[in-house]
Image (cartoon, rainbow, N blue to C red):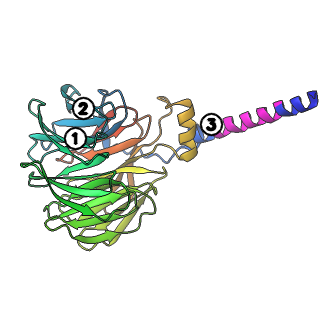
Amino acid sequence: MKKYKWKAVVSAAAVLIIFTLTAVYFQIIKKPFEVNSGIAVHHLTFRGHTDRLWEAAFSPDGEILASAAVDGEAQIWRKADGQIIHTLKHPAGLTGIEFSPDGKMLATCGYDSNITLWRVADGSLLKIFSGGGKTVWDVAFSPDGKTLASGGEDAVVKLWNIAEGTLLRAFEGHSLNVWSVAFSPDGQQLASGSFDTSVKIWNTSDGRLLRTLSGHTQAVLSVTYSRDGKYLASSGDDSTARLWNAADGSLITVFREQSEHIYSVAISPDASWLLTGGRDRNTFGELIQNFFGASETNRWVTVRLWKLDNGKLAQTFSQHSNDVFSVAFAPDGKWLASASEDKTVNVWQLMP
């Protein structure tokens, strides 16, 4: 009997040693490639939330940011010093947030299935649109500020008349969650990214499906147009960001990450840079991190800055201690922001 107990002890010790060595390898040794070019310099870390952040967005003038978190709060705060201007409280966790083109309104969406419209000047509630009983994952203003687009758990893309508070049109074609929606700069098209691995392009005037972009092998989590309308970028769970020709849907460049998921992608206003944010570790590394907790002293790359024209990695960022779910450029192209599971937003300044 003692012999079997001894064997059990040895086996348990061996498993523990293997687990420890594997954890050390994936948490400390096997770090992703880093580039410290100094193209962007860290400006501040905003710590106004108590739970995971899903998104952060710049105002049209670039002077304030808004952030949305699972804590049920949207914070409106100054870029210069991180001072909170307004706190917008919701009955449930938030998943998305965006300023109107004129900067006077803010739209939020979340787990309560609603889209809520707020006045930025005083933080007052303007209007609530019912999303249909399921989580709304993303919301976007049309370039003229008259229409809202939303995508969510019901796999339907919806257009809303802001003035009337009514549903204009529903685009059905995705088979799984719609995670991201984006208007083209002229407002004539709408892109949607879904868990069904596709990007779909819709005609906003009549709801026709114009084309489906295929290439991602896992869920598409983010879509965005360049300001000039020439490019469409997408990213997803397949560890890639993809740049497409917006005119014909042809694939231009594939940006490959070392992490497993790219949750967000953004194109700079001058179409010089691509910004991506995602997981800081691979699958096993995530399991280890979930077991031991996020480490403030062992931060990995979560945000990457790429040259749009050649797909080369220009700089990496490791200020976050956990996954990044949102990245954004300021309208002037001189500032970057990222929102993370670590409950913070980081802001960087691009150097001249």
**Residue 245 horizontal/vertical position (percent):** 28, 69
**Figure quadrant of the N terminus:** top right
Determine the residue positioned at 77% across, 33% down: 12
Q: In front here: 219 or 250?
A: 219
Q: CA distance from mark 3 to mark 1?
A: 40 Å
**Residue 199 seen in this snapshot:** yes
Determine the residue positioned at 45% across, 59% down: 218
* Number of residues whose C-alpha sits closer than 10 Å to that of mark 1, classed few (under 14), some (14–19) or many (20 or more): many
* Number of residues whose C-alpha sits closer than 10 Å to that of mark 2, classed few (under 14), some (14–19) or many (20 or more): some
Residue 250 magenta-highlighted: no
**Figure quadrant of the C terminus:** top left
Report if the CB atoms under discs 3 and 1 are less than 8 Å apart.
no
The main secondary structure of the magenta stretch is helix
Disc 3 target residue: 24
Indicate the secondary structure of the residue bearing disc 1.
Answer: strand
Sequence-earlier tag: 3 or 1? 3
Q: In front here: 188 or 204?
A: 204
Determine the residue positioned at 22% across, 41% down: 108
Give amino acid for label 2. His
Q: CA distance from mark 2 to mark 1?
A: 9 Å
Indicate the secondary structure of the residue bearing disc 2.
Answer: loop
Q: Residue 108, labelled with which disc?
A: 1
| Quadrant of res 92 | top left
Sequence-earlier tag: 2 or 1? 2
**Residue 311 seen in this snapshot:** no
Determine the residue positioned at 72% across, 39% down: 18
**Residue 229 horizontal/vertical position (percent):** 19, 63
Give amino acid for label 1. Thr
Q: Residue 90, labelled with which disc?
A: 2
Q: Which residues are magenta?
A: 9-23
